[in-house]
Amino acid sequence: MKNIITFLVAVVLVVGCKKSTLELTNPNQLTSDTYWKTEADVQSAFAATYGLLRDVNGGFYGVRGIELGNGRGDDFFIRNDVAALYQLSTFTNTPDNGTANDLWNISYRAIFRANQIMENIDKVPDLSEDAKAAYISEAKFLRGLNYFILAINFGDVPIILKAAASTEDYFVAKSPEADVWTQVKQDFTDAAANLPVSYSSEWVGRATKGAAVAYLGKAQLYTKDWSGAATTLQSLTVAPFNYQLMTDYNDNFVVTKENNQESVFEIQLGDVGGTNPWAGENASQSIGVTTAQEFAPAEVAGWFEVSPTDKLFNEFQKEKTTGGELDPRMYATLIWDYPGATFYNKPFSSFKLLFGYSAMFKKYQNYTQDNELTGASGASDYTSSNNERALRYADVLLMIGEALTMQGKPADAYPFVQQIRTRAHLGPLATGLTQDQMMAEIRHQRMIEFARENQRFYDLKRWGLLKQEITNSDKVGKQFFVADKHDYFPVPQAEINANPKMEQNSHW
């Protein structure tokens, strides 16, 4: 079992207040003065920070985060079982939406923990300066990633770079989104400086130099620094990095092929810990997620919360392979009524499509099992140990292609885009594509390459195509989308009520 998972137990960091010398210290209570004693304490603090990325309620790669990150796209539908999710998917949410608010709260909890690590690392005896520098870089990566998540979802947010020392520090005003992106890029730049290229097998899953470089390039792309993005991301295509596309696209989404050569950053999951995936941070919590169970149909003990739209179903069929077949990514991503189709060891004809769409999601499902009653190891109820691949090398290649194309160099984008096409058994691109034609190809490839991977809505937003593509879809609730307003979530109402310096986002 991976050490990074075994550390993902209920490690809750606490901050102690200054105490009078007349007060006694409780030897059973952890404080910031008593916790930071060994390197194992540092590692446990990191585990608690990484763990929030897959937090059941507000982690961007936990079940609610996957639903939230995909649910607003033109390729995704969430049914009306959970009101907060349905509201997000149909653009009828308000500032008191619990799911969006949990994303805000969990992101800031992770930032708080990363800040704690940086502020307390010097207290740990016998750590070399190199080790301290590496740990600080790792903490900056996690802080940068959480600010990245906040920037794409909320825009203007408070920038908090140290743990609050007094009540006066609790209330922080929002910074402009541009300043948040500056902080994101600085954190990833600093992280890349001292993170290792790889770890020993027991620490696979921790942030690497490549992960920091990739997210830096992604942040540069999101802020339209095309030249910087191209330079940064192209560094990942040469030594000391050795990322490659997997030969079989489907290998990126099955539990037996985790942490493979295409994985740049991956959320580590496992059927370990307790048996309750909804327990919160305590000994009862499972370290798996319920995403596969929530997406599975009722016939195999699923809740069938979501469905791909037919817009996505049809997008996959726009181009056949060189052998005249459907794109293999369609078979890896979706399951539908084609000859011989099976799902959870049953013929597809035994399943009922409930929402008027043509397919179900197959990607990340434990479809080789008979049902989703247990995780992949059978250890915990409803939990899956299939890692979420947060950033793949395929994303790096298409981002390079986009950054070059947006500089007016579509000819330079060919080798990077063609790698994606070749893996999918598609023919060579026609020569002489214009900038607009190459971007149309990249947009098409990103839609089908990253379906269900928390990408589509954010891609459309940075391309300025949200209104156009949501309107031109069969998405339920598309009529409620309001340009500019629904580009971002509102600041949680509870934050507005509690923080006198906080202002609501524009258009809300």
Image (cartoon, grey):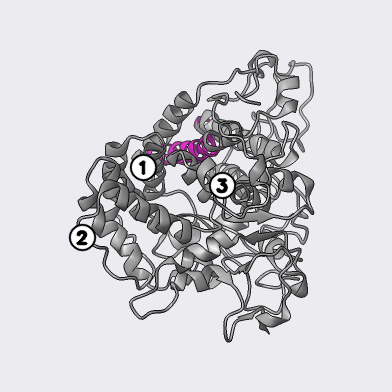
Taking the spot 26% from the left edge, 42% from the top edge, the residue there is 231
Q: Is residue 299 above or below residue 194?
A: below
Looking at this view, is 504 or 464 the one in front?
464
Query: Position of 282 compared to 427: left or right?
Result: right
Give the number of the disc on residue 431. Answer: 2
**Residue type pointed to by label 1:** Gly
Per the image, the residue denoted by label 3 is 470
Residue indicated by mark 1 = 217
Circle 1 sits in a helix, a strand or a loop, which is it? helix
- Three-letter residue code for mark 3: Ile
Whether label 2 touches label 3, CB < 8 Å:
no
The location of residue 62, given as percent across then percent down, is 64, 52
Q: Is residue 244 visible?
A: no
Indicate the position of residue 470 as horizontal and vertical percent values.
56, 47
Question: 239 above or below 321?
Answer: above
Q: Main secondary structure of the magenta part?
A: helix
Q: Earlier in the sequence, mark 2 or mark 3?
A: 2
Q: Position of residue 128 (x, y in %)?
A: 41, 39
Q: Which residues are magenta?
A: 122-149
Q: Residue at x 52, y 47 (%)?
A: 469
Q: Which sits in the foreground, 8 or 325?
A: 325
Disc 2 to disc 3, C-alpha distance: 31 Å
